[in-house]
Amino acid sequence: MNDDYELIDSGDGRKLERFGDITLVRPAGQAAWHQTLPETVWQKISAGFDRKEGNRWHNRCNLPDEWTINVAGITFRLSSTDFGHLGIFPEQRVMWNWIRETVQKRKEQSGSVSILNLFAYSGGSTLAAAQGGAEVCHLDASRGMVEWARGNASLNNLQDAPIRWIVDDAIGFLRREIKRKRRYDGIILDPPSFGRGKKGEIFKIQDQLPELLTLCRDLLSDNPAFLLLSCHTPEYSPMILQNLLTQWFKDLRGTTDCGEMLLTGNPGVLPLPSGAFARWVAS
Ligand SMILES: C[S@@+](CC[C@H](N)C(=O)[O-])C[C@H]1O[C@@H](n2cnc3c(N)ncnc32)[C@H](O)[C@@H]1O
């Protein structure tokens, strides 16, 4: 994979990553082992972020206001946010390749594919689906993030692709879509542990995941292709997500699988677990 992202090393609660020409050190509580590379390598960074005294960047002035990288065949605009995010979660890159291929195959069989992407952030999954030929509905409660994703669509020459850009609360939108009798062949959702809807509605994964899955199941078309659920909430292991999908989709013909999302680098670099995913795929 010829990507501009690489995990260089991790350990002692931190990760060292490369995003194009920029190298960063950021917190990674799950890196329970010791760093493999010497401290001198960790010192040669563009900038760092830590949460020791509140959220704080070090040497942020070394970072360009924005830069672009290509990951899994998608170009992303990156920029350092006050929360330490950059506009990409590279642990999703395996998913983006899978989404593109799965959509392409379905499109060859059925002629058209409609995909709903919830909690869609900067649009990696949306753009992978659009590259595969899907009509996509992209939803996020943050207007700024939807603008960021639209910008990424343009960077990928997908500005005229059939993508609906929605700023809304996920649960409220799903309820209204059911009333409007809209249906989707594939649904992708990456709910945060805690979030806020457009009007400040509180979203807590522990309280709302069951309802979210019920609404998503009701929104699948008569000939559904897949549902892909991922999250970064430490309490939700891959098997917990898979058990949820197995139970929720037991009446539909399909199979479930699950796995850890990983930040990865060159051969020999310890992969860094960064969340979990589970999939239901029609058979
Ligand atoms: C963890 S990020 C998703 C990461 C993304 N799927 C990716 O891998 O690139 C969570 C996103 O959910 C959005 N969000 C939080 N609460 C929401 C809600 N109630 N309804 C819709 N979106 C929400 C946030 O604005 C944020 O963009």
Image (cartoon, rainbow, N blue to C red):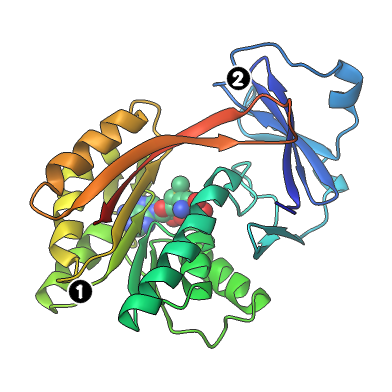
Q: Residues within 10 Å of mark 2 (few under 14, many from 20)?
A: many
| Residue 266 place in picture, x, y as percent | 75, 35
- Kind of residue indicated by mark 2: Ala
**Residue 131: which numbered mark, if any?**
none
Could you tell me which residue is drawn at 29 percent across and 36 percent down? 241
Instruction: Depth check: give the residue in front, 242 or 38.
Output: 242
Q: Is residue 161 above or below residue 34?
A: below
Tell me which residue sits at (61%, 36%) in the image.
Answer: 263
Spatial separation of the CA atoms under disc 1 and disc 2: 41 Å
Camera sees residue 208: no
Q: Residue at x 67, y 14 (%)?
A: 12
Give the residue number, with chain letter if any, for mark 1: 183
Residue denoted by label 2: 31
Horizontal relation, residue 103 to residue 279: left or right: right
Tag in front: 1 or 2 = 1
Secondary structure type for disc 1: loop
Task: Confirm whether residue 20 shows in the render.
Answer: yes
Indicate the amino acid at tag 1: Arg
The image position of residue 118, as x and y in percent, is: 35, 60
